[in-house]
Image (cartoon, rainbow, N blue to C red):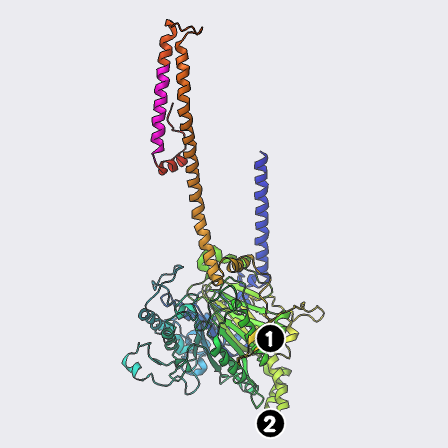
Amino acid sequence: MRIRRKKLLYLLATAFLVVLLLARTRRGDADDGTAALVHPNVAVRLSAAGADAAATTVAQSVFISCNRHDRDQGYWDLIATAAVCEGADVATRRASAACRALYAGEPAAQVAGTTGSCAAGGKLPRLGGRAAGGEADRPLDALVWLGDAIYADKRADGRKSLQLFQVSNPLPLVKTFWVAQRRSPIYSTFRETCVRLKPSGAGTSSGGAAAAADPDDYYGTAVDPERRRIYGTWDDHDMGKNDGGREYPDRAVTQRFFLNFLGADRADPRWEHEGVYTFHPVPFPDGDPLAPLLRESYRHAMCFLLLDVRSFRDPPNASRLGDMLGGAQWAWLERRLATDLADGADGRRGCAAVLIGSGTQFMMDVLPAENWGEFPAGRDRLLGLLRQHRTERVVFLTGDIHMGELAVDFGSAAQQVLGYPLVEATSSGLTHSASDYGALSKLVQLWFPAPRRRLHIYVKANFGTVRLTAAADWAHTSRGQLAQRLAQHVRESPDDGAARQQLHPLLDAMVNLSLGIFAVQEHGRPVIRLTFPLEMLSWRAGADYAGAAVPHPRAGGTVHRRPRASPPPPAEQLGTTEVPDGQGRTRWVLHYPFTTPVPFLTWLARFNQRHLFPGGSIPRSVVRTLTFCIEMCIFVPVAALLLCVWRRRRARRRQRLAGGTAAPRLRQRGDSGLLGSSGTGNFIDAPAAPTIAGYGKVKRHIVGTTEASSTAAGSGVMDEVLELFIGEGKQKQV
């Protein structure tokens, strides 16, 4: 009774702790804006999702990753709707049924023939039946692939099911994957109606004789050059090998597949060198009233610096001493920072936003997955180069993890290493995501917390947007009017560098950078947002945002500065790392630390990598650990079962030996019964017969027992195993 009472108390205590944990999780979600997003009132949901945001969009791009060409491509229509609605004004968003459905998370009525299209007549009825004929109607300045555009190492079965294992597909079959995705009707419609043209002269060269001979010859050069701004880099699966790097032998062939998928021009240098790293500046669009003002301070609206973290990557191991980019790419990166992203001779800055794209996560190293944390020296070297060249307004765009995530480091580590907060946006999972693992995906926040960096993580299918925005009434504010006067003065006196220097901080404070993660399974609704002025990522004002916060990342995502009365974040003591400088020498840079506190599962994966599997990556150590656990789950019960069988057989053998020594004793007792009780040797007639008969029965019993024991000894192991489960209720009766 006492034991039952203890069990009951234990169950009640466990249930109480689970309820507290769920309540805390639910309260945390409500604090970040979740309650408003799921409010029963549609008006509240629209406002929380950003339908009422009184902002004008100056430039807009979409970044995506992790796509299966053989699965449903309907998400392109959601991306088109989000691009159109995010670029429209408040009144237009309110009047459009498609936009209202988008921000409310409800399915929109599909207009026939407009699937995947950004045609204004289908999305924004206020603009009339005008189709997307001009460049002004195309809302996207660029579409950027951040890896895994197709899965070359998976079976193309067209089913939405988990495929945990990889296959080695022949290269001709892999080519058909690329061709199928490039020629997908809905993807083609999206490119033609949503994405603007490349700058004049780009993407117009002919594919040459090879293209004329075979339009599907993806081994050739520039088969079908793309006129639109479709940019990208690759990751492991579209390169051809899961978790692969420079050891993959066929990457030269798959690189041509990838470049033809993007529609790279014949003059693209990537046709001639190894690796798919590239640089793409995006100009300010014509027609926006704020664009002429911004051109006086920045040469470009956005600059995409897309890195190749696969072609040159060393095999990761526990030493963490390898490299991700390789010498040629490091030299190229430093040239870009020193030229394209540096201030010009006229005083104008390179780009309003520098977007560094990578297939794997850069700052967020909390998951036991591939990331830049496996090569900490490379991460420190990149941050050191950004600080050395005073590159400002930098945001990292990443993919790979099959989840969407926004993260900011407002702590002292980022201030010391970079000079301003470190921002990362991850969009990963168009056709599949972590939610395919069911209830396990809901435990990501609980198992892998990162309270000091992560704003929020979304585990379902998603896509990301990055926008340059400004308040709708910017021209009527005092800052806007002063900026217009300074810009006019700069146009009249281009050599007045002092006036231009006064214009820079005004525009940095007036223009915002807005990042968003949109949910595919919630009909395109924005689920995570982050909005901050460009000055937050500058040397001049970045220190003012130390210790800042984002109270509602799921509804608005506006950055709030730390109150002046509150103390700054505690200073961290950072170490240093020795890295190459590209000229045959080395230099010391500050070491950017790992995310703390380290989740237990991540710590366990790193521990196993360091002590058990030092020759592989962290994901490999996780796989090997799981494999070992599965093997132990099979081996231990089998070993225990065999041990039980062996012990039972040994016990029976002892019984047989004991039975063999008992026979002479019984025979001796039987013989003594034949004599008289007086021991004189005289026979007694009356009890003699029963005694002799009893002796015969005992003898027959001993012989039968011996025969049964010998039969059991030769019955085999399977009979013993069956007896363990059947029991001993039906044993032989003696």
Residue 99 point in image, percent of width and height: 48, 71
Q: Which residue is mark 2?
A: 495
Give the main secondary structure of the magenta stretch.
Answer: helix
Left/right placement of residue 420 relative to residue 252 reads: right
Q: Which residue is mark 1?
A: 588
Q: Secondary structure at mark 1?
A: strand
Q: Which-is-in-front pick, marks 2 and 1?
A: 1
Q: Which residues are magenta?
A: 695-715
Q: Nearer the viewer, residue 704 or 89?
A: 704
Residue type at the position of mark 1? Trp
Residue type at the position of mark 2? Asp
Left/right placement of residue 503 relative to residue 231 reads: right
Distance of label 2 from label 1 (alpha carbons): 38 Å
Q: Quadrant of the N terminus?
A: top right
Q: Quadrant of the C terminus?
A: top left
Is residue 473 at least partly visible in the picture? no
Residue lying at 37% horizontally and 14% vertically, measured from the top left: 694
Q: Quadrant of the rendered structure where residue 187 is?
A: bottom left
Residue 143 within the segment the image draws in magenta: no
Residue 194 point in image, percent of width and height: 43, 77
- Residue furthest to the right in view is 565
Left/right placement of residue 325 relative to residue 69 reads: right
Q: Nearer the viewer, residue 728 or 35?
A: 728
Question: Which badge, 2 or 1, comes first in the chain's sequence?
Answer: 2
What is the crowding at mark 2: few (fewer than 14 residues within 10 Å), some, or many (at least 20)? few
Residue 44 point in image, percent of width and height: 55, 65
What is the crowding at mark 1: few (fewer than 14 residues within 10 Å), some, or many (at least 20)? some
